[in-house]
Image (tube, grey):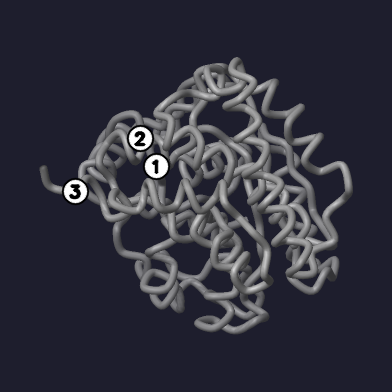
């Protein structure tokens, strides 16, 4: 199976390397020093799940040079979804599936507007990983899972073939017939993890050790759950309780990628995370004070570190 990974950061690098190791024909799109290091030394993934090295690696900054593929793992940041999505045409054959793996709940809808409904699946991942240095992805802990599915819930041949490939790779995979539910479960976890670890500048271990801070963490989830239900997503009644249990099992040093971006002075996905919850809360008349506080406190840093 031929796969294009668009955006070789923590997500794209982790899952692309695992699929390449499992025998897939994987082409990676990257840029700058990261691309140069991959072309010279291969792609290396280090951390809690051990070490994987893909060398030589197919790596380029020219999407069109890859040609048509079976699956596109679309892993760019949210602000790049629309401009980069418009460049995906040369990758698409009749049955190609583009699977967006962005944070938030907007990316698939944006891609459908660009590429058409038949070209787009939807997906969500759980992994703590980031670019440690050019050519190297560092994972924190052992958690690594992918959930994906057709947006209309059908079990198609392309979805089943990709599921079989993922099943041979070294991560958990689920083919869902109602992808909106796991997407929103992830969104609930992410709004809390991203907002709270970024705003507090603390890893999850420090947050959960303080009952008052962890109550704030839970309130972020519950606000996100409320707007999800108002959007018509059939979230299970025990979703927050299960997510709290999962959070207690995370490595104490874990923090969200948005917290890492904040510490590095990078642009933040804030408008599509806490900002999205605030937006939907206003739409449905649901109070979202915890998310609003995160949004307004981090808003000055949303486009990167402000000048002194």
Name the residue rendered at 29%, 30% in the picture.
Answer: 133
Sequence-wise first label, 1 or 2 = 2
Q: Nearer the viewer, residue 118 or 302?
A: 302
Do the CB atoms of the residues marked 1 and 2 lie less than 8 Å apart? yes
Residue under label 3: 306
Asked if residue 1 is positioned above or below residue 260 in the image, the reply reads: below
Asked if residue 254 is positioned above or below residue 85 in the image, the reply reads: above
Q: Residue furthest left?
A: 308
- Spatial CA distance of label 3 from label 2 is 35 Å
What secondary structure is found at the residue carrying circle 3?
A: loop
**Quadrant of the frame with the N terminus:** bottom right
Do the CB atoms of the residues marked 3 and 2 lie less than 8 Å apart? no
Sequence-wise first label, 1 or 3 = 1
Q: Nearer the viewer, residue 124 or 50?
A: 124
Asked if residue 245 is positioned above or below residue 264 in the image, the reply reads: above
- Spatial CA distance of label 1 from label 3 is 37 Å
């Amino acid at each position: 199976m031929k796969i294009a990974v668009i955006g070789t950061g923590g997500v794209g690098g982790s899952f692309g390397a695992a699929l390449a190791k499992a025998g897939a024909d994987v082409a990676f799109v990257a840029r700058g020093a990261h691309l140069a290091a991959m072309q010279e030394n291969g792609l290396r993934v280090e951390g809690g799940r051990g070490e994987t090295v893909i060398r030589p690696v197919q790596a380029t900054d020219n999407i069109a040079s890859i040609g048509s593929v079976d699956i596109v793992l679309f892993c760019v940041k949210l602000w790049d979804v629309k401009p980069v999505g418009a460049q995906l045409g040369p990758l698409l054959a009749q049955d190609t599936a583009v699977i967006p793996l962005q944070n938030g709940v907007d990316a698939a809808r944006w891609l459908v507007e660009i590429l058409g409904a038949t070209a787009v699946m939807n997906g969500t991942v759980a992994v703590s990983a980031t670019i440690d240095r050019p050519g190297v992805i560092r994972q924190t802990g052992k958690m690594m899972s992918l959930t994906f599915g057709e947006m209309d819930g059908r079990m198609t041949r392309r979805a089943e073939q990709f599921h079989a490939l993922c099943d041979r790779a070294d991560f958990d995979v689920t083919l869902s017939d109602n992808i909106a539910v796991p997407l929103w479960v992830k969104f609930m976890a992410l709004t809390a993890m991203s907002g709270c670890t970024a705003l507090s500048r603390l890893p999850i271990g420090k947050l959960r050790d303080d009952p008052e801070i962890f109550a704030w963490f839970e309130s972020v989830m519950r606000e996100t759950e409320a707007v999800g239900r108002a959007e018509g997503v059939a979230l299970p009644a025990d979703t927050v309780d299960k997510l709290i249990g999962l959070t207690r099992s995370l490595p104490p040093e874990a923090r969200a990628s948005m917290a890492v971006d904040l510490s590095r002075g990078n642009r933040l996905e804030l408008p599509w995370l806490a900002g999205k919850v605030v937006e939907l809360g206003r739409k449905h008349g649901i109070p979202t004070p915890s998310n609003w506080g995160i949004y307004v406190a981090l808003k000055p840093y949303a486009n990167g570190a402000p000048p002194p």
